[in-house]
Amino acid sequence: MDVKRVIWRYWDKRSQTYDENGYNSQKEVRHFWKGLLEDVIRTDESLKILDVGTGTGFLALLFAEMGHNVTGIDISRGMLEKARHNADKLKLTVDFMHCDAENLPFEDETFDIVTNRHLLWTIPSPKVAIDEWCRAVKSGGRIMLIDGRWYDPTIDMRLRRFFGRIATFVTEKRSPRLFMSYYAKIKDQLPFFDGSGSNYIVDLFTEAGLKNISLDNLEKLKEFENKSRSLAYRIANKPSLFLALGEK
């Protein structure tokens, strides 16, 4: 089975409704995330940034609004179409490109920062991907990865996911079965399907030759997410989030 074909077909389908159920207030979430990113970047210079797995452009558009030169890539053309529409609405310029996170079409040492958010779980070869991102970042540049462990097998969380699926159907008019109708076929071929622990990311960063590796457990983000996400999300999710940063 062509795993990546299944992945892009799902996200093409999902792109049709993706932005409609993310947060209660887009204004609040953009303000919060810009503050978070500014704390990480800590510079007034305009950087060249690659957002891998950009989706509808969430991170890419925030970085562009902060004055950076941003490229966003995704395997889903549907998501990229939505990202370009979002950029037009905000009157922001981002170079959105269709390509594979594990095989970048850029020369060595092109970017100051390579970043991604909630991506590793749907990548067949996370080590290959991180090695490729390191190739594309400049010496002294950074890899910034925002991820978490998504699946909690306890009975309490199983019940919460069940009621979350009901809430998704009732409040968002979206079938909760769509996701597994695609991913059930390929989940065993995705090493981080259940999410990635921060210790695994540190190991991958170390193997890729990154230095000055740091972790942030994003407690303020988790608090914000619990207040700002949709009802279905709050019922079904209790992710262990973190931000990993490594320097080339």
Image: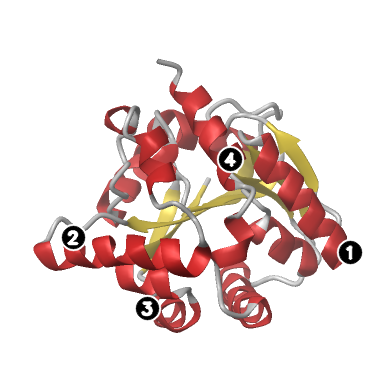
Q: Residue at x 31, y 50 (%)?
A: 195
Residue that carries the numbered disc 3 in the rendered image: 219
- The secondary element bearing badge 1 is classed as loop
In front: label 3 or label 4: 4
Q: Earlier in the sequence, mark 1 or mark 2?
A: 1
Query: Which residue type carries mark 3?
Result: Glu
Query: Which residue type carries mark 4?
Result: Lys
Residue 73 visible in the shown view = yes
Query: As displayed, is residue 152 above or below residue 188?
Result: below
Q: Earlier in the sequence, mark 1 or mark 4?
A: 4
In front: label 3 or label 1: 1
Label 1 to label 2: alpha-carbon separation: 42 Å
Marks 4 & 2, CB-CB < 8 Å contact: no
Q: Earlier in the sequence, mark 3 or mark 2?
A: 2
**How far from the left and from the top, in percent, is residue 6?**
48, 27
Q: Nearer the viewer, residue 137 or 59?
A: 59
**How far from the left and from the top, in percent, is residue 160?**
24, 67
Residue that carries the numbered disc 1 in the rendered image: 91
- The secondary element bearing badge 4 is classed as helix
Query: Which residue type carries mark 1?
Result: Lys
Label 3 to label 1: alpha-carbon separation: 32 Å
Marks 3 & 1, CB-CB < 8 Å contact: no
**How far from the left and from the top, in percent, is residue 166?**
34, 63
Q: Nearer the viewer, residue 174 or 57?
A: 174
